[in-house]
């Protein structure tokens, strides 16, 4: 897509299907104090966003007490775009940043793209037990058939958002997905910068990248803020709501653009 065409596309998109900041904040504030409650809360947010019936499922995961939560938005093509975020947290703070910030955006992103015609099937997944070694995402990938893996065009992982303007980890990102994100950010005039966080450990995108599925992680962590993760400082007041909302807008535009590729 030419840059001028992308710019017009981004401008038009910002006027379509956009949820208000108050709704994004309300869902962020709905965090619970146990992983079981978070799994149920995520299901309820999906349901209120319109993901119901056979399109909303639980996937029981070996060695995990809570299941993966999967919301599927079907399209005519077999190809898929997966958008994922883990809902479990380390019980040293409230786990709002890591990772209710990513998880609570999934229903909003579903709601933002569900009305428009789509080429790809979108699959929104709340992963269980990321903090225990990517248990939920590894299970999801390993139970896929060879054909199903081949059909996944992209995996977009959301982890620890709202600490700062949107960041992308290029060390582990698929190059084409990273270039597309940069192009959408530039055309939408939304902030994006590079911050590689390999030293902080692995994230759910690695489960897909390990199986040669194109993957990318969007986050907000900086050298000044990474000490907030897994600490008592991981509270709602650590979130910068303007940055968080900009991240929602960018990911929303990004998913629509990926669907055109």
Image (cartoon, grey):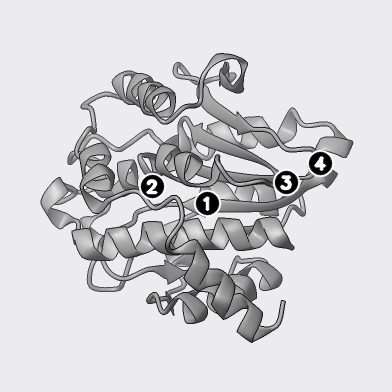
Q: Earlier in the sequence, mark 3 or mark 2?
A: 2
Element at label 1: strand
Q: Earlier in the sequence, mark 3 or mark 4?
A: 4
Q: Earlier in the sequence, mark 4 or mark 1?
A: 4
Q: Residue at x 32, y 47 (%)?
A: 101
Determine contact: label 3, label 2, CB under 8 Å. Answer: no
Q: Nearer the viewer, mark 4 or mark 1?
A: 4
Q: Which residue is mark 4?
A: 77
Q: Nearer the viewer, residue 52 or 89?
A: 52
Q: CA distance from mark 2 to mark 4?
A: 27 Å
Determine contact: label 2, label 1, CB under 8 Å. Answer: yes
Q: Residue at x 62, y 63 (%)?
A: 257
Q: Residues within 10 Å of mark 1 (few under 14, many from 20)?
A: many
Residue 102 — which label?
2
Q: Residues within 10 Å of mark 4 (few under 14, many from 20)?
A: few
Element at label 3: loop
Q: Earlier in the sequence, mark 1 or mark 3?
A: 3
Q: Nearer the viewer, residue 212 or 193?
A: 193
Element at label 4: loop
Q: Residue at x 47, y 46 (%)?
A: 112
Give left or right: position of 117 versus 60: right
């Amino acid at each position: 897509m030419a840059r001028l065409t992308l710019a017009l596309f981004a401008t038009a998109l910002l006027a379509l299907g956009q949820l208000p900041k108050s709704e994004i904040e309300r869902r962020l504030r709905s965090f619970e104090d146990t992983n079981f409650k978070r799994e149920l809360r995520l299901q309820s947010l999906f349901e209120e966003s319109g993901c119901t019936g056979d399109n909303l499922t639980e996937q029981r995961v070996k060695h995990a007490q809570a299941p993966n939560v999967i919301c599927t938005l079907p399209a005519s093509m077999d190809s898929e775009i997966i958008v994922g975020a883990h809902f479990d947290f380390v019980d040293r703070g409230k786990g709002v940043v890591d990772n209710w910030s990513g998880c609570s955006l999934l229903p909003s992103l579903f709601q933002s793209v569900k009305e428009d015609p789509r080429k790809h099937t979108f699959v929104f997944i709340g992963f269980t037990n990321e903090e225990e070694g990517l248990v939920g995402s590894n299970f999801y990938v390993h139970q896929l058939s060879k054909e199903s893996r081949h059909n996944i065009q992209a995996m977009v992982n959301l982890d620890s958002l709202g600490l700062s303007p949107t960041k992308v980890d290029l060390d582990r990102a698929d190059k084409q997905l990273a270039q597309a994100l940069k192009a959408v950010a530039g055309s939408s005039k939304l902030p994006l910068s590079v911050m590689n966080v390999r030293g902080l450990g692995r994230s759910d995108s690695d489960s897909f990248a390990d199986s040669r599925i194109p993957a990318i992680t969007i986050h907000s962590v900086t050298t000044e803020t990474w000490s907030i993760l897994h600490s008592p400082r991981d509270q709602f007041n650590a979130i910068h709501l303007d940055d968080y909302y900009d991240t929602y807008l960018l990911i929303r535009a990004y998913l629509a653009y990926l669907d055109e590729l």
